[in-house]
């Protein structure tokens, strides 16, 4: 009996210290709320950006266009499509992992799209709805990130 009581107190003491294992950490419900929302928002963005990156690869490989159409376009168009084929998928991976670099890469990708759409509308499509949608995504991401950071204080 004595040994069993001693074992329970050591188990209790082990649970009270801060652990580096996520499932063992005591978590307040208010801390989880915005962090949870941010994680899932980033994962939804990741799915959208995987589709955007794969659509750029479809243009390169000629899935939606006739074969040879990509090679016949200007060098600026080719470089832009290749850039988005790479950066969109890299950003999607980082977003899915809910890492800081993923958010930064996504902001770089989306701002690149907006800037190129403004200055080179013939290469990058940037209709009013697309620009409004992207700006809304940026505002929501920054807002949720700010709320999640405020919870950690």
Image: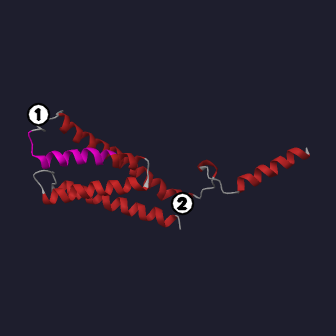
Q: Which percent across, then down, holds residue 72?
A: 8, 39
Q: Nearer the viewer, mark 2 or mark 1?
A: 1
Residue carrying label 2? 31
> Residue placed at 46% from the left, 61% from the top?
148
Q: Element at badge 2?
A: helix
Residue 87 drawn in magenta:
yes
Q: Which percent across, then down, holds residue 65?
A: 13, 35
> Residue placed at 35% from the left, 60% from the top?
140
Q: Residues within 10 Å of mark 2 (few under 14, many from 20)?
A: some
**50 or 36: which is nearer to us?**
50
Q: Element at badge 1?
A: loop
Most distant residue in the front direction = 75
Span highlighted in magenta in the image: 72-89
Residue 57 drawn in magenta:
no
Total label count?
2
Q: Earlier in the sequence, mark 2 or mark 1?
A: 2
Q: Which percent across, then down, holds residue 78?
A: 16, 45
Quadrant for residue 121, please give it: bottom left
Q: CA distance from mark 2 to mark 1?
A: 53 Å
Identify the image quadrant of the N terminus: top right
Residue carrying label 1? 68
- Do tag 2 and tag 1 residues touch (Cβ < 8 Å)? no
Left/right of residue 144 with respect to residue 86 in the rendered view = right
22 versus 30 height, above or below? above
75 versus 104 height, above or below? above
**17 or 57: which is nearer to us?**
57
Q: What is the chief secondary structure element of the magenta stretch?
A: helix
């Amino acid at each position: 009996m004595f040994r069993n009581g001693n074992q329970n107190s050591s188990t209790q003491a082990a649970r009270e210290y801060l652990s580096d294992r996520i499932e063992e950490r005591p978590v307040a419900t208010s801390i989880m709320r915005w962090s949870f929302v941010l994680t899932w928002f980033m994962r939804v963005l990741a799915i959208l950006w995987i589709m955007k990156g794969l659509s750029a690869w479809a243009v390169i490989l000629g899935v939606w266009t006739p074969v040879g159409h990509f090679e016949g376009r200007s060098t600026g168009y080719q470089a832009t499509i290749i850039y988005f084929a790479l950066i969109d998928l890299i950003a999607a991976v980082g977003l899915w992992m809910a890492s800081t670099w993923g958010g930064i890469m996504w902001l770089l990708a989306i701002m690149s799209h907006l800037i190129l759409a403004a200055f080179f509308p013939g290469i990058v499509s940037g209709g009013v709805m697309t620009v409004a949608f992207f700006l809304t995504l940026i505002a929501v991401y920054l807002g949720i990130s700010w709320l999640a950071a405020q919870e950690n204080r």
